[in-house]
Every structure is written in structure tokens, then in C-alpha cells.
Image (spheres, helix red, strand yellow):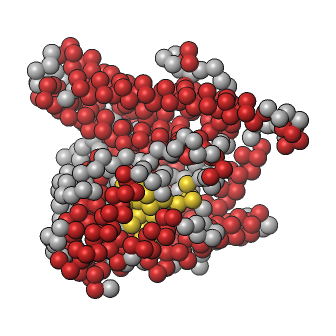
């Protein structure tokens, strides 16, 4: 425990504070990519998909390296497939600890930890990933770049967004960091409790599903009604406060982005003129989404706008579970816009206020006899499971397959053909992005002609939209409750006019291909690579936009 306390004090005193972009040793100087699975490994070598991501803190790497080794290499009974995540800030701290720059007595323990991570990353071990510097540079409101605890927590939140189908768990012996994670809705456990927690996680999921299938839904709604009454009595202003903060932030964002997009003509083009009600603001966002906001944040967030409008502007009663969802959706929307700007400080202030409302509501719900959110989540998962059974396309039965010995060979060949098309799309996107980045390089953009810059900038916007669309399609497929209907987002992208000539397969064949464990594993890697590319493109977009504005082109 002395090492844990020493590391905690060093963080608090900022003796371990480093710039995100600072490299300080062999780990932070590596080219960190997500692992690419060996194509020769058969699908039977994988489990049913990525279930759990365990984020490892520095004190665990230092004090319990053998535990981390076993966690990576050995299967835990009752626990599905997991991967270990090493945050960028942990890589920085280990590099410096290895040199003895911060805590001399920890140096001997840091060296084998650095060597272990280095070999895993070098060999692209699929069960240990490193957070890239690009991801670590992405800011999340409410967290400080200067605080290493918050940077570890930021890593957890980012991987929650990148892998919604998996449970993200922080492993640390720092109790204060555990507290921060828990109030931010990230599961956190010390080393001593982690294995038991992982096993209980899967056991509880199974038990909840079985119990739900054998019981009626009446008791769940009775609990919810009791919770709603308690919530309304204790916090009558929670919805008005949410609407107030939404209105202030969205009005500022609307005016700013419309001026950027249309200049002096923005008021003429605006769908509804100010002063705005929240309902009018949300109508403006829906109206201008594709032309303006879809180029600033992921287009899929239109569903968030529609959700807010449906529940806040239609004079319908709102229960506590819906309030919780609305707060989550509002935070998600603010976070997406935060990568663009802080909008003169309005956005971080609104985010902080909504986050306070969310934490207050979460605390009230956690005090109840049973967390209602888990009840509703299980209900939802069960409903989706039933929907999957109804919608899954009819495939050959096992008896039919026995009649055709060549079936498996032909099917695998077909899957490889389909996968080659997906690889071709990725290669095209990758090459095109490199070409655009070269044209928009900061060292050359100041001398680039206006016409060339505009052409490259337009290409960047189109590519950003395409990457967002394909990543959203893959994310829908990778959710644990995905069904045949979830294939259409990806399939519709693939059969678009630009690449239609390469598509010689049906949506059913694509679904059958990506349902195989081997190809789902590759999709998981590809999804994260697309997310990192999307993040880099957004940074480039913001930089070039600023340069064009400074030169008076916008």
C-alpha cells in the first residue's frame, strides 16, 4: 500500500504531471495501434465477442504485474473475452518511473512493467491495447488535462463510447480514483476485488435475464412509480433546470454555427428567428442538421435532438428513467460539440450544470432498494432479444448442412470475398485521407491557393461524413443485441453510388459474414481505427477552418 500512497501523493503534487504530447521513453515513443488479428487464426479460437475492457492504472502495473500477466493470458471461469487497456498517461508515468525521475524506490518495479507492455504492444497482442496520444488529446468537459487521475478516467469514458457493446472497468488501488470513477458511471475495483467482480458481473446478467423471462413486468412498473413520486417530491426543478441549460447552450451553438456556415446571410436562412423557446431551438437543429450540424458532430446525434424534442416539448409526463436518459443524452450532445469549441465558455458551464443534475438523480436512484435503471435495461435487452428471434433471416439447418459436405468451404470463400470488399473500402478511405492531410498540412496551407484549399477542405468534409456513417454502421452491428435489421446502415453505405460496382452480395450475406466470430473481431479493430481517424480529421478540420477564416475566405 505504500507504493499506492506514494504514487497518489506524486499525482496530487503534480510531480507526475506531463503534457499529453510529451514522450519520455520507449513506451510513449512507440507507434501505438490497436491489434490486428492474424488472418490465419480460425474463428473457433475466439469467444462470443468482446465483453469486458479493463483499464489498468499505474499502481496496479507497479505492484501487481504478475496479476496483470495472468489476467491477460488466462481465462477466468464465467467471464467472457476481455482486453486490457493501458491509458496514455500510465505509459508516460511508467517511462518516467523507469528512469527514476519521480520515485527512485519504485524504479526497479517499473522496469519489468515497461518491458511487459512494450512486448505486448510490439507483438500487437489482441488482449492488451494502449491508448493512443491522439485519443488522449481529446478533451472531455469536467476533466482536467493537468490531473493524471482525470486523464485515466477520461480514457475509461472514451472506451465506453468506442465500444458500447462492452463493459469498461477501471482497476486501481487508489480509492479516491475509484470514487471519481463510480460517480462518473464507470465501474471501478481494486485488485483484490476485480476477479470476483468480473464473475459476478456475468452471473448477475444471466440471473436477471432468467428471472425476467419467468415473471411479469407489473412489479417493475410499480417500483418505477414509487421512484417517480419520490423524485418529483424531492427535486421538482430538475426538468426546468435541464431545459434552462439546454436552451442557453443550444442557442449559443446555433447562432455560432449558422454564422460560420452562412456569414451575414445566416438570419435570412435560419428556420425560426429568435427569441427562441427550447422547442423552436430543437426544430432549428432538425431543420439545419444535414447542412450545418452534421458536419460538426456525428450525424447519428440527430436521434438525440429528436429524443429531447419528443420528451421535453410534447407536454407528455416524464418518469425518472426518462429524465435520466434525457440527462445522459444532453451530456452526450454537449460532449460532441465540445470537440468543436467551448462557445465562449457557455458549453462547459452548461455541461457542468447538467452533470450535477445527473449525479443528483443517480444518487437518489442508488439509494432505492434496487437500481431501476438496471431493471429497465434488462427489460429493454429482453425485448430486443425477442425481436432478434423474430427477425433473424432463415439459414440452413444443421441437418441440411450435413447433406452438403462442401457447404462450409464455399461459405468461407464467400465470407472472404465480402471481407475483401470491406478491406478495399478501408484502403480507399485511408489513402484518400493521407492525400487530404498532405494538402492541408499546416506547414503548406498558408501558401496554398484558395481554390486548392477549398477543394481539399470540401473533400475532408465529405470523407468525415463517410467515416462517421461507416463507423456508426459497424457500431450497430457490434452491439450485443444486434439483429439483422442493424446491418442496413452499413449495407446502405456500401451500395452507395460511389462504390456500388464492387458490391456483389446481399444484405443477408453481409449479415451472415459479420456474424462470424472471426470477422466480428476484425470489425472491432476496424471500428476503433475509424474512430481514431475520425478524431484526427476533426482536428484537421478545425485547424484549416481557423486558417481559412483568418485569411478572410469565410
Q: Residue at x 33, y 68 (%)?
A: 113
Q: Is residue 184 among the parts visible in the rendering?
A: no
User: x, y percentage for residue 392?
Assistant: 74, 40
From the viewer's perspective, tell me whether residue 290 is left or right of residue 479.
left
| Up/down of 456 relative to 296, above or below | above
| Up/down of 386 relative to 543, above or below | below
User: x, y percentage for residue 172?
Assistant: 38, 73
Q: Residue at x 17, y 77 (%)?
A: 104
Camera-side residue: 236 or 346? 346
From the viewer's perspective, tell me whether residue 239 is left or right of residue 8.
right
Image quarter where the N terminus lies is bottom left
User: x, y percentage for residue 229?
Assistant: 56, 71
From the viewer's perspective, tell me whether residue 268 is left or right of residue 495.
left
Q: Residue furthest bottom?
A: 2
Q: Residue at x 63, y 70 (%)?
A: 77
From the viewer's perspective, tell me whether residue 548 is left or right of residue 361.
left
Give the image quarter of residue 550. top left
| Up/down of 88 relative to 366, above or below | above
Image quarter where the C terminus lies is top left
Give the total of numbered labels. Answer: 0
Camera-side residue: 2 or 104? 104
Give the image quarter of residue 215. bottom right
Q: Residue at x 39, y 76 (%)?
A: 64
Amino acid at each position: 500500500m505504500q507504493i499506492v500512497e506514494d504514487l497518489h501523493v506524486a499525482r496530487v503534487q503534480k510531480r507526475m504531471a506531463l503534457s499529453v504530447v510529451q514522450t519520455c521513453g520507449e513506451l510513449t515513443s512507440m507507434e501505438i495501434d490497436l491489434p490486428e488479428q492474424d488472418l490465419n487464426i480460425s474463428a473457433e479460437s475466439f469467444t462470443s465477442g468482446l465483453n469486458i475492457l479493463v483499464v489498468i492504472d499505474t499502481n496496479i502495473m507497479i505492484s501487481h504485474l504478475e496479476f496483470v500477466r495472468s489476467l491477460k493470458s488466462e481465462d477466468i471461469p464465467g467471464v467472457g473475452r476481455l482486453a486490457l487497456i493501458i491509458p496514455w498517461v500510465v505509459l508516460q508515468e511508467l517511462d518516467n518511473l523507469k528512469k527514476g525521475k519521480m520515485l527512485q524506490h519504485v524504479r526497479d518495479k517499473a522496469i519489468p512493467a515497461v518491458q511487459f507492455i512494450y512486448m505486448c504492444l510490439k507483438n500487437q497482442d489482441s488482449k492488451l491495447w494502449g491508448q493512443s496520444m491522439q485519443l488522449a488529446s481529446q478533451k472531455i468537459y469536467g476533466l482536467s488535462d493537468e490531473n493524471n487521475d482525470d486523464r485515466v478516467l477520461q480514457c475509461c469514458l472514451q472506451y465506453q463510447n468506442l465500444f458500447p457493446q462492452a463493459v469498461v472497468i477501471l482497476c486501481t488501488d487508489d480509492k479516491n480514483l475509484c470514487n471519481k470513477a463510480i460517480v462518473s458511471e464507470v465501474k471501478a475495483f481494486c485488485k483484490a476485488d476485480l476477479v470476483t467482480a468480473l464473475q459476478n458481473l456475468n452471473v448477475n446478467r444471466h440471473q436477471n435475464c432468467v428471472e425476467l423471462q419467468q415473471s411479469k413486468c407489473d412489479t417493475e412498473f410499480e417500483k418505477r412509480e414509487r421512484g417517480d413520486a419520490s423524485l418529483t417530491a424531492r427535486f421538482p426543478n430538475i426538468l426546468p433546470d435541464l431545459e434552462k441549460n439546454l436552451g442557453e447552450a443550444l442557442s449559443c451553438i446555433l447562432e455560432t454555427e449558422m454564422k460560420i456556415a452562412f456569414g451575414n446571410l445566416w438570419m435570412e436562412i435560419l428556420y425560426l428567428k429568435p427569441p427562441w423557446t427550447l422547442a423552436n431551438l430543437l426544430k432549428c437543429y432538425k431543420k439545419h442538421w444535414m447542412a450545418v450540424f452534421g458536419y460538426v458532430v456525428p450525424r447519428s446525434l440527430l436521434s438525440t435532438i429528436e429524443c429531447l424534442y419528443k420528451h421535453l416539448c410534447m407536454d407528455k409526463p416524464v418518469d425518472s428513467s426518462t429524465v435520466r436518459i434525457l440527462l445522459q443524452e444532453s451530456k452526450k450532445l454537449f460532449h460532441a460539440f465540445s470537440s468543436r469549441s467551448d462557445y465562449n465558455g457557455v458549453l462547459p458551464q452548461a455541461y457542468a450544470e447538467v452533470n450535477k443534475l445527473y449525479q443528483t438523480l443517480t444518487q437518489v436512484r442508488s439509494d432505492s432498494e434496487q437500481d431501476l435503471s438496471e431493471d429497465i435495461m434488462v427489460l429493454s435487452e429482453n425485448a430486443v432479444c425477442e425481436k432478434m428471434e423474430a427477425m433473424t433471416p432463415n439459414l440452413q439447418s444443421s441437418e441440411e448442412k450435413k447433406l452438403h459436405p462442401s457447404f462450409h468451404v464455399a461459405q468461407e470463400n464467400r465470407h472472404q470475398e465480402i471481407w475483401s470488399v470491406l478491406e478495399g473500402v478501408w484502403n480507399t478511405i485511408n489513402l484518400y485521407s493521407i492525400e487530404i492531410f498532405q494538402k492541408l498540412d499546416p506547414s503548406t496551407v498558408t501558401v496554398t491557393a484558395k481554390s486548392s484549399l477549398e477543394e481539399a477542405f470540401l473533400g475532408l468534409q465529405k470523407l468525415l461524413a463517410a467515416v462517421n456513417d461507416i463507423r456508426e454502421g459497424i457500431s450497430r452491428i457490434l452491439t450485443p443485441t444486434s439483429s439483422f435489421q442493424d446491418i442496413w446502415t452499413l449495407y446502405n453505405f456500401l451500395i452507395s453510388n460511389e462504390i456500388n460496382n464492387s458490391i456483389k452480395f446481399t444484405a443477408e450475406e453481409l449479415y451472415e459474414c459479420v456474424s462470424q466470430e472471426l470477422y466480428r473481431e476484425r470489425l472491432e479493430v476496424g471500428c476503433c481505427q475509424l474512430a481514431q481517424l475520425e478524431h484526427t480529421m476533426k482536428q484537421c478540420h478545425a485547424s484549416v477552418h481557423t486558417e481559412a477564416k483568418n485569411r478572410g475566405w469565410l
